[in-house]
């Protein structure tokens, strides 16, 4: 932070009402998350009431961490339990956070650059940061902290030693940009591109555009690409020409930057306003990177960097991997691979991610020298404090500067001069069942370390995007009343995504309940430390003991089963929470109306079984066609449920909606809903495909490419036939991996280099051939997308007459799951 803030100043800034003791200690840190507080006594806690967690629930925890100053919307119930605390009560904590950020921003007298646009913001910010760091000490927002709370937190990251700050601004709704502008007050603005992303909150593209450009209200310079006609028109209409800095492929702009693609990379030729010419060389050839790169070049030129200085740095701008990915390591280890650049803010994000993974034997960090501006002693002091806070069991430092850490960090640590030495010593660390975070600056080539620790993967992987999962969860959550609980169906290995990891993230997202199909699935979750209540849809009688031992809650669907389970519990002196499945029209499992009499009798007879909920399942929730039937089911359910409730001391939860039902019949949300396929990114009604994000991407690689002649046949039964001379690629995926054999002979399509290729011949057990005659430059080893964001699963399912559910759950367990957050 730039400047400590005394409480009295804060009070005035925030127009807050003050309660509790009067503190005069200024705060030097601001936190919204008690898990991340390091310097308790000097930290202000701002209690935000977000959708996921309410900060107000953590006030006592913060107080116990020695925090004494709090910004809140509501006071804690027992103020007397916080004898030394000062509470500043405000009407909106988010607004308070923003006001404090604005105050800090106004203390910074150096240039501030702000980036907005639909795509490329984070990459442009990262590259620009790397490029400018060769000359200045640069502050920049961590990851893509660009929201109403992310921007303030980024501003608090600016330190007095910084000479320049680069911040990202992202919005999803009208009127948000004004607020961000007021905080950032950028001297220079960059507009990357306008796209369709996040269009939801806006009436149309123009409204979105007009909102975004509010970021530039007081910017001296605004950099944009003139070839984007709409952006150009809007900017020219709202800002005087002398503030606009345009670049384009074509002559007639301030900077003309033409691209020539070559065998190895591209050549970018700059023609300046004074007709000077300069040539830059880059390894990138894809359009998006070349566009982002040109934004970076123009910005650096505008800031007064020389062409030569820029050109020297370009080779170091590597593809920014904005992901933290979770990979299975050898010997049961779990690796967090963060190839993101290595500064304190980035490390904090990664350590937090680590904190949220399931517990393993030890928490180990392998880390290189930090790329962090400022006094190095204080940098490593801060690093030491952070490591102590996150309670690491072992820290392995690599590089020349990181040994500075030794003076400040008392935990177990080892140091190596370079990556090679570290690699040689890995064997001595007896890594087994450990959680290992690997975080190195690019020069240290830590991918070698990841490579040596990673479990060797068969070429096919299913990538699971945990951010998409979070997005989808919140999409459904927002459509429901705050009091409605969410049970998430993680049956069938969480629809193929991997039950443990997904359950773990759901626990963080505050799901209320989980459901699995069989007892074994529930036991596996308990063994992996999942504590949420778990409903078991179809438990077998042999598993009753396991249900009790693991605190699993079975569904009971018949009188016979009720009596059996009741007798078991009676004889073993156990009690069990159970859920009653009422059949109102699905005709699968469940009590029919005529069973109720006997059921009521059994409920009286076996008080060992506590009814936690009743539910029914809609047979046609995803089609308007069945609306009357669905409403009939709901009516019957309510009648049956109230008959049972009448004899119970407490009212159990009632729930009927699956994913499709949440969208179509929110009026029937009752006490809980059962979210399944929607969480994984598929909206079966087809009404909200835009808002959901696919969670999984199935990828494989090309094993071999063959040139064939017209009339050559391909694969078993010679079912494939080349209609002309051409080439095929054999990919490492077959029906044993879950690639359905019905995809044979042109039904299935994959994507290679962004282009479609169709299956030729029959799908084999472990391999499939695809026709790539129309694709140039494809090589063996290249990546093949089988489905994912770019190739929707729904379309693939439709091509072979099935549904997404089947394809998702069929992916074989031999396909490795890799989890990441972008
Ligand atoms: C699988 C299942 C769901 C979830 O259905 P989706 O269509 O995936 O949302 C809900 N309830 C029951 C009883 C289920 O078996």
Image: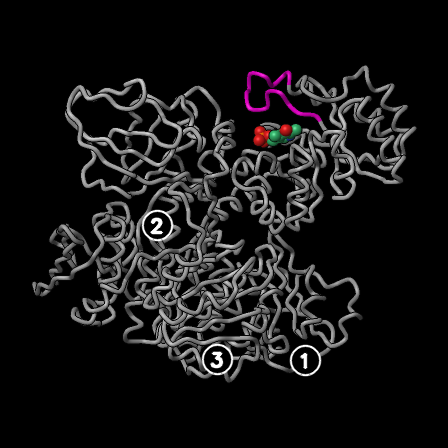
Q: Earlier in the sequence, mark 3 or mark 2?
A: 2
Q: For residue 753: magenta?
A: no
Q: Secondary structure at mark 2?
A: loop
Residue 405 badge:
3
Residue linked to disc 1: 23
Image location of residue 402, percent across then percent down: 43, 77
Identify the residue shown where x is 11% and y is 53%.
251
Q: Are marks 1 and 3 in contact (CB under 8 Å)?
A: no
Badge 2, how many Cα within 10 Å: few under 14, some, many 20+?
some
Quarter of the rendered image showing ligand 1: top right
Q: Position of residue 69 (x, y in %)?
A: 65, 73
Residue 657 visible somewhere in the drawing: no
Query: With respect to residue 430, does 287 lie above or below?
Result: above
Depth order, front residue of 59/773: 773
What span is colored magenta in the figure?
616-629
Circle 1 or circle 3, nearest the eye: 3
Q: Is residue 289 left or right of residue 510?
A: left
Residue 624 is one of the magenta-drawn residues: yes
Q: Earlier in the sequence, mark 1 or mark 2?
A: 1
Query: Which numbered disc covers residue 119?
Result: 2
**In the image: residue 665, left or right of residue 229:** right
């Amino acid at each position: 932070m730039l400047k400590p803030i005394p409480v009295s100043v804060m009070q005035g800034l925030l127009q807050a009402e003050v309660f509790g003791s009067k503190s005069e200690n200024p705060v030097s840190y601001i936190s919204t998350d008690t898990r991340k507080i390091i310097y308790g006594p000097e930290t202000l806690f701002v209690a935000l009431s977000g959708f996921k967690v309410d900060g107000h629930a953590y006030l006592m925890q913060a107080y116990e961490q020695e925090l004494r100053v709090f910004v809140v919307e509501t006071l804690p119930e027992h103020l007397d339990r916080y004898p030394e605390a000062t509470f500043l009560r405000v009407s909106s904590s988010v607004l308070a956070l923003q006001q404090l950020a604005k105050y800090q921003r106004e203390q910074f007298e150096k240039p501030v650059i702000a980036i907005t646009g639909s795509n490329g913001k984070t990459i442009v910010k990262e590259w620009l940061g790397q490029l400018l760091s060769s000359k200045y000490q640069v502050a920049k927002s961590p990851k893509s902290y660009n929201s109403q709370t992310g921007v303030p937190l980024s501003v608090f990251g600016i330190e007095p030693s910084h000479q320049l700050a680069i911040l990202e601004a992202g919005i999803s709704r009208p009127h948000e940009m004004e607020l961000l502008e007021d905080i950032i007050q950028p001297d220079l603005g960059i507009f990357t591109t306008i796209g369709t992303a996040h269009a939801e909150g806006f009436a149309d593209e123009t409204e979105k555009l007009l909102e975004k450009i509010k970021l530039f209200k007081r910017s001296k310079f605004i950099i944009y690409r003139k070839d984007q006609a709409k952006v150009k028109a809007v900017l020219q209409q709202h800002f005087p020409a002398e503030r606009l800095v345009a670049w384009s492929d074509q002559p007639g702009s301030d900077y003309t930057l033409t691209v020539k693609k070559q065998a190895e990379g591209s050549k970018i030729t700059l023609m300046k306003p004074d007709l000077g010419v300069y040539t830059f060389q880059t390894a990138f050839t894809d359009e998006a990177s070349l566009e982002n790169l040109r934004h970076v070049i123009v910005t650096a030129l505008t800031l007064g960097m020389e062409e030569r200085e820029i050109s020297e740095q370009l080779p170091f701008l590597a593809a920014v991997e904005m992901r933290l990915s979770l990979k299975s390591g050898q010997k049961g280890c779990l690796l967090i691979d963060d190839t993101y650049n290595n500064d304190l803010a980035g490390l904090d994000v990664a350590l937090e991610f680590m904190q949220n993974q399931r517990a393993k034997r030890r928490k180990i960090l392998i880390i290189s020298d930090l790329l962090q501006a400022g006094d190095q002693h204080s940098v490593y002091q801060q690093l030491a404090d952070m490591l102590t806070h996150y309670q690491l069991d072992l820290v392995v430092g690599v590089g020349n500067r990181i040994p500075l850490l030794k003076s400040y960090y008392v935990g177990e640590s080892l140091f190596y001069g370079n990556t090679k030495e570290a690699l040689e010593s890995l064997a001595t660390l007896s890594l087994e069942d450990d959680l290992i975070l690997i975080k190195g600056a690019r020069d240290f080539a830590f991918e070698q370390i990841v490579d040596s620790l990673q479990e060797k993967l068969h070429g096919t992987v299913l990538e699971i995007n945990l951010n998409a999962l979070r997005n989808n969860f919140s999409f459904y959550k927002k459509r429901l009343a705050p009091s409605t609980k969410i049970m998430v169906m993680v049956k069938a290995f969480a629809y193929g995504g991997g039950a443990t990891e997904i359950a773990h993230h759901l626990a963080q997202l505050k799901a209320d309940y989980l459901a699995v199909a069989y007892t074994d699935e529930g036991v596996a979750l308990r063994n992996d430390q999942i504590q949420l209540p778990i409903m078991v849809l179809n438990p077998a009688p042999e598993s009753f003991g396991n249900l009790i031992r693991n605190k699993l809650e079975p569904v009971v669907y018949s009188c016979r089963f009720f009596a059996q389970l009741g007798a078991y519990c009676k004889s073993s002196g156990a009690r069990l929470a159970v859920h009653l499945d009422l059949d109102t029209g699905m005709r699968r499992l469940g009590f029919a109306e005529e069973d109720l009499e006997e059921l009521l009798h059994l409920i009286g007879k076996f008080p060992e079984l506590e009814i936690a909920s009743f539910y029914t399942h809609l047979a046609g929730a995803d089609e308007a066609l069945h609306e009357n039937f669905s409403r009939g089911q709901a009516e019957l359910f309510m009648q049956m449920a109230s008959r049972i409730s009448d004899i119970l001391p407490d009212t159990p939860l009632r729930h009927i909606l699956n994913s499709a039902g949440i969208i179509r019949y929110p009026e029937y949300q009752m006490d809980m809903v059962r979210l399944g396929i929607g969480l994984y990114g598929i909206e079966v009604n087809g009404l909200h495909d835009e808002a959901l994000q696919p969670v999984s991407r199935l990828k494989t690689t090309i094993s071999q490419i063959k040139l064939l002649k017209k009339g050559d046949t391909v694969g078993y039964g010679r079912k494939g036939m080349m209609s002309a001379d051409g080439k095929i690629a054999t990919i490492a995926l077959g029906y044993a991996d879950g690639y359905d054999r019905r995809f044979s002979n042109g039904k299935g399509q994959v994507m290679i280099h962004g282009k479609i290729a169709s299956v030729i011949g029959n799908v084999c057990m472990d391999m499939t051939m695809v026709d790539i005659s129309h694709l140039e430059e494809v090589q063996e080893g290249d990546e093949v997308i089988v489905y994912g964001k770019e190739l929707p699963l729904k379309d693939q399912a439709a091509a072979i007459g099935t549904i997404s559910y089947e394809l998702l759950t069929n992916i074989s367990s031999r396909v490795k799951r890799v989890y990441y957050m972008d």
